Image: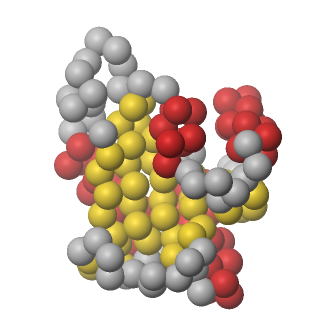
Amino acid sequence: MATVFEVRGARVWPRGVLNDGKLEVVVLFTTAPATQFALRSAAKLADGLSAKIRLLVPCVVPYALPLNQPPVSPRVFERKLRDLAQQAEVACLIDIRFCRDQWDAIEQALPARSLVVIGRSPRWWQRSERKLSHKLLRDGHQIAYAE
């Protein structure tokens, strides 16, 4: 189940309004501060490449709940992500994937050889995020780290 909407500056735009360039820079949501920094870095990268930015947010729903009823209200989650993109002052497409397995959702959402930006916090990266970046590299994606 995916929810997709676009954010440009301080307004939410209907899908399809952003740059239709062939290249897409995907920012993978990790933590709010790291993702906000990754969005800003992706904006600089995308500007030079005339590309659009997509914020990919895999949201794992526990098996005890139906997929269409995640633990956090989708509207609240969407609002927080919009605020995050607006604070970063980045025009982007926000792609929320409610899923059972984070990696499966990422695999399904990324076209082959995607350019993925991942934000790192000042502290050493968590083990799960390190494993995720290794999987992305192994699958042939290009990764840019925003530190």
The image position of residue 127, as x and y in percent, is 73, 29
Residue 30 falls in which quadrant of the image?
Answer: top right
Residue 35 falls in which quadrant of the image?
Answer: bottom right
Q: Looking at the image, how many numbered discs can be counted on the residues?
A: 0
Identify whether 49 is placed above or below 128.
Answer: below
Q: Residue at x 33, y 70 (%)?
A: 6
Say whether residue 14 is left or right of residue 107. left
Identify whether 24 is placed above or below 109.
Answer: below
Residue 116 can be seen in this image: no
Task: Pick the quarter of the image with the C terminus.
Answer: bottom right
Say whether residue 78 is left or right of residue 102. left
The colour scheme used to paint the residues is secondary structure
Say whether residue 108 is left or right of residue 82. right
The image position of residue 98, as x and y in percent, is 35, 37
Residue 59 vs residue 17, the one in the foreground:
17
Q: Residue at x 41, y 67 (%)?
A: 93
Say whether residue 112 is left or right of residue 75. right
Residue 37 vs residue 130, the one in the foreground:
130
Residue 95 can be seen in this image: yes
The image position of residue 8, as x and y in percent, is 36, 79
Q: Residue at x 50, y 42 (%)?
A: 108
Task: Pick the quarter of the image with the N terminus.
Answer: top left
The image position of residue 111, as x and y in percent, is 58, 55
Identify whether 75 is placed above or below 60.
Answer: below
